[in-house]
Amino acid sequence: MIDLDFLSNDYQDNRPVAQKVAESIAIDILTGTLRPGQRISERVLCDKYALSRTPIREILNQLSSTGLVTLIPNRGAFVTGITERDIDDYFYMKNLLYPQCVKWAIERITAEEMSALEETFAFMEFYTATEDLEKMKKINHGFEAIIYNASHNPELERTLLRYDFLILYANKDIGYPLNYLPTVLEEHRAIFRAFQEKNTDAGAEAAQIHAYKSMMRRK
């Protein structure tokens, strides 16, 4: 069953607590609330999230595997963060992987997944017209997440979702041009049309254009 909860205004986040806490700490790192080189206090995290030291340590171990945190024996956990070059690299890697993902998704998408993609694109058109930027950011993410899932390659899906998360929050304060929503809608329309026509080459080309333009909008 494809999860379209992101389309609802009443969406409730039912993920495990540890996953939500790990994401919250990662967001604090990416947005600069926790700064590179800063020591992360387990006690402060325990108090903030009402968790014991054991799950907090497991979460910090998880974040160290993503490169956002460095664990130093007998000293504790320190913020590593990401650099501008790291962000550029994530954009570049998405530019390489997303077109292939779209090609595989067009080849492998199920009827249920295609129905979810169609419904999401219809919402995308509606909320673009209402100029609801925050809602559209969720829908755009959902549209791409459905495509990642439809590639039926779990490693590729995990990698692209991770890139999107890092790119989103590392660029949290970057402004959006006035024509951002209709421009992105047309980029997604080209991808969606390729799915309708089952045209893998057109899909890969449209995906590459969208990924490249997303990178350039950050400049």
Image (cartoon, helix red, strand yellow):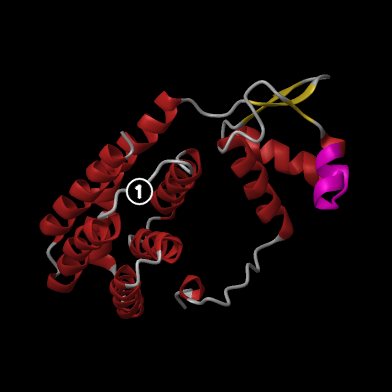
Judge whether residue 62 is colored magenta: no
Observer-nearest residue: 35 or 4?
35
- Please tell me how many numbered marks the rendered image carries: 1
Residue 214, image x, y percentages: 29, 45
Q: Amino acid at mark 1?
A: Tyr
Horizontally, residue 53 falls left or right of residue 143, namely: right
Q: Residue at x 80, y 51 (%)?
A: 49
Q: Residue at x 22, y 65 (%)?
A: 106
Q: Secondary structure at mark 1?
A: loop
Judge whether residue 47 is colored magenta: yes
Q: Which secondary structure dominates the residues rendered in magenta?
A: helix
Residue 36, image x, y percentages: 62, 24
**Residues in magenta, as a range:** 44-54
Horizontally, residue 161 falls left or right of residue 27, namely: left
Observer-nearest residue: 136 or 111?
136
Residue marked by disc 1: 176
